Image (cartoon, coloured by chain):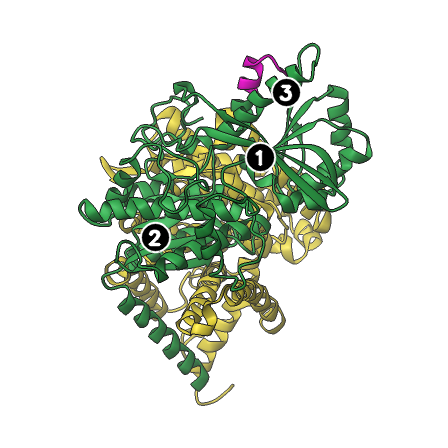
Chain colours: A yellow, B green
Amino acid sequence: MAGFSMRPCGDFRTTYRQDTRIFDTTFVRNAAILGIVAVGLIPFVLDGYYVNLFIQISYFAIAALGLNILVGFTGQISLGHAAFFGFGAFASAWINNHTGIPVLLSIPLAGMATAAVGLLFGLPAARIKGLYLAIATLAAQFILEDFFARADWFTGGSYGAAANPINVFGYEIMDDFSFFYVSLFFLVIMYVLGSNLMRSRDGRAFVAVRDHYLSAEIMGINLTKYRLLSFAVSSFYAGIGGALYGHYLGYVSAEGFTILLSIQFLGMIIIGGLGSVKGALMGTVFMVLLPEVMETGVSALSVFDWANSTAVTDGLAYIKEMAIGLAIILFLIFEPDGLAHRWQQIRAYWKLYPFSY
Amino acid sequence: MKKLIAATAMMATGLSVGAAKAEDSVFVGHLMDITGATGFIGKFYADGVRDALSYIKENGGIDGTPLEFESVDYAYKVPQAIANYKKWRSRNNMVAMQGWGTGDTEALISFVAKDEVPVYSASYSGHLTDPTGKNPKTAKPAPYNFFYGASYSDACRAMVQWAAEDWKKKGGEGKPVFSHIGDNHPYPNAPKEACAEYATELGFDVTSPVVVSMKPGDFKAQCLTLKEAGTDYGYLGNLGPSVVSLVKSCGTVGVDPTWLANIWAGDYETLKTIGDVDNYVFPVMTSFWTDEGVPGMDLVREISKESDKTGKEFRTHHYIRGICSVYYMKEAMEWAKENGGITGPNIKQGMYALTDWVPKGLEGVCMPATWTAEDHRGINTVNIYSGEAHGGDVKVTKLETVTLPRRDDWLGY
């Protein structure tokens, strides 16, 4: 899906290394770096609302990339991603609260702990696939959700757990301004790692397992190993995303990690584009911004007197919720390959302009 | 394309008009859930808050300072609640917020404490009552969180205290049996341990909690568990459709304990839906819409006209509790205006300025409350009502008013 690239005339590749570069051309690489620098200026230019939206995008996008590695690249299905996301949040809070390990270290440790849990729940993947696996992961969702509410020693039970703010060299990252940079740092690192993984031997094996498991096996790929590895990597990403979420809120409660969030993660990668690293990011941006755009639209109507009666505002609230669902359905019908595919088409259009082929 | 530009322009105008209005006024954000997981009950409370805010806006604001507010349906999704909070904070200079559920209130504890924005929510978790973290059991101090009413724990304790007396009055022999019934979820679990401890202290035999899903269903198996345990008093920790299904299921298998419902599970609407029940006890923190001769009800009826011009629409006590929540905030803001300006920290001080106070105009409706810098249990008095329903006729009678001691070990718990 993501193989289509725009290469300038005369740019021949003579080695595999050249062929698997993260960025097709120097221009694309420079543009990406410039893009990250531009994003880094957000807190100086835009207000707290946008900064918060960016932070939301970053922790969700990290987890969404994890799910895309599992679903989009390896072809396994998971309906329990929110539970792993939650596990990461609780694990990081627990590690920091009980061992005194600084938060910046407890976040990757929580990722590893979540990877271990993911491995455990990924075990059925060695034997089953498709719908059966989906239901097995659904069980993981419910088991972990119940665990969150019961394991007082680990999660604080119903009361939830307090998560300390990130502390860098004695400076506490309490406000959104500084947390923005922490989340940007993690986002970039995790996405570069993700892109690299997909260029590696293991990443190629994931894709082979997805495309045709029998052929993959004949080629010598250990199916069980790679299916489990995919679960572990996916959960590692979910754990890192969850840990960031926990430390951002300063408080982790079992209530937030329901099946609905798992489905939302699936929505993000489907809308963004299955099997595309940048698709995971694009899908997350879409899913986080859509309700906000709808809300702005609805509240913009309040300048009119007729829109201020309770009946109308309540009606608009329902329309807002329905429109989000509608947008997703329309997306699936008209853009089934996701935003990443649309992005490729836009690039192709400008590259080939004024000729359409 | 033209339409898109027009729509963008319209939205931009809307935003700039909003900004222009904000001058010399104070802004209060209002998070409500009318379409989400708790929307069926959230709507009643949200209407109360919204009507009270618009009434204040139209009738002089905060001692002459215009009041601006925005009600946003966040559909019980925490990220949306946080985004709205951030928006109001950075764009509208919000001084106080009316919130709603457990998820959003807890997620916002750190932000509001840092930004010094008092939040008045409808989440009555006991652990929001400890502003300094004095009790070692408090997970996290919540210095800027307030709520109007008794905490879930205190309301349950009051009902247990009433149940102990009731058992004696009925001439019950041996130890009465108490069971907590609810989903394994932060909201029903909030008073679980606190209430069970007090029940044991009062001589109850406390059974293991019975887990019942928050979603409605057939709960006959759980009812049989209650039958086997010989439950005399069952605390209903869930709300709405789940509680209705449970009471109905138990009715069909002949399990008939005295139900002790939490505050969201006891009202005319719920009793009417259950249809046939005798022994349904629930806590109430305000007057009822049908009460006569209560001076403050005149103001409540005026406020109700904000969304119902006829003034005849029936309002639940959740609606009235929403009004109380707004009016306590309003008086604290008025105090703040006289004492250095309407800012978050001053509003917080305003909450501590008086003891045993009732907002002006709501005498008899809201109960006298006292908040202090060390204790955010505004109210430790609970009115206990009993409900009966037979074939659509609902009868509600007041049983008792229980005042609990302000025990230190109960703070934040």
The reply to whether label 3 and label 1 mark residues of one chain is: yes
Horizontal and vertical percent for residue B154?
A: 49, 27
Horizontal and vertical percent for residue B363?
A: 41, 42
Is residue B366 placed above or below A61 in the rendered structure? above
Horizontal and vertical percent for residue B293?
A: 50, 44
The reply to whether label 2 and label 3 mark residues of one chain is: no
- The residue shown at (48%, 58%) is A284
Mark nearest the camera among 2 and 3 is: 3
Residue at the left extreme, as displayed: B340
Q: Secondary structure at mark 3?
A: helix
Q: What amino acid is found at the position of numbered circle 1 in the picture?
A: Asn
Chain under disc 2: A
Q: What amino acid is found at the position of numbered circle 2 in the picture?
A: Leu
Is residue B101 placed above or below B194 in the rendered structure? below
User: How packed is label 2: few (under 14 Cα within 10 Å), some, or many (20 or more)?
Assistant: some
Horizontal and vertical percent for residue A330?
A: 60, 71
Q: Tell me the residue that label 3 is attached to.
A: B166
Q: Tell me the residue that label 1 is attached to.
A: B262
- The residue shown at (56%, 56%) is B35
Quadrant of the drawing holding the C terminus of chain B: top left
Chain under disc 3: B
Distance, label 2 to label 3, CA atoms, is 60 Å
Q: Secondary structure at mark 2?
A: helix
Q: Which residues are magenta?
A: B196-206
Q: Tell me the residue that label 2 is attached to.
A: A184
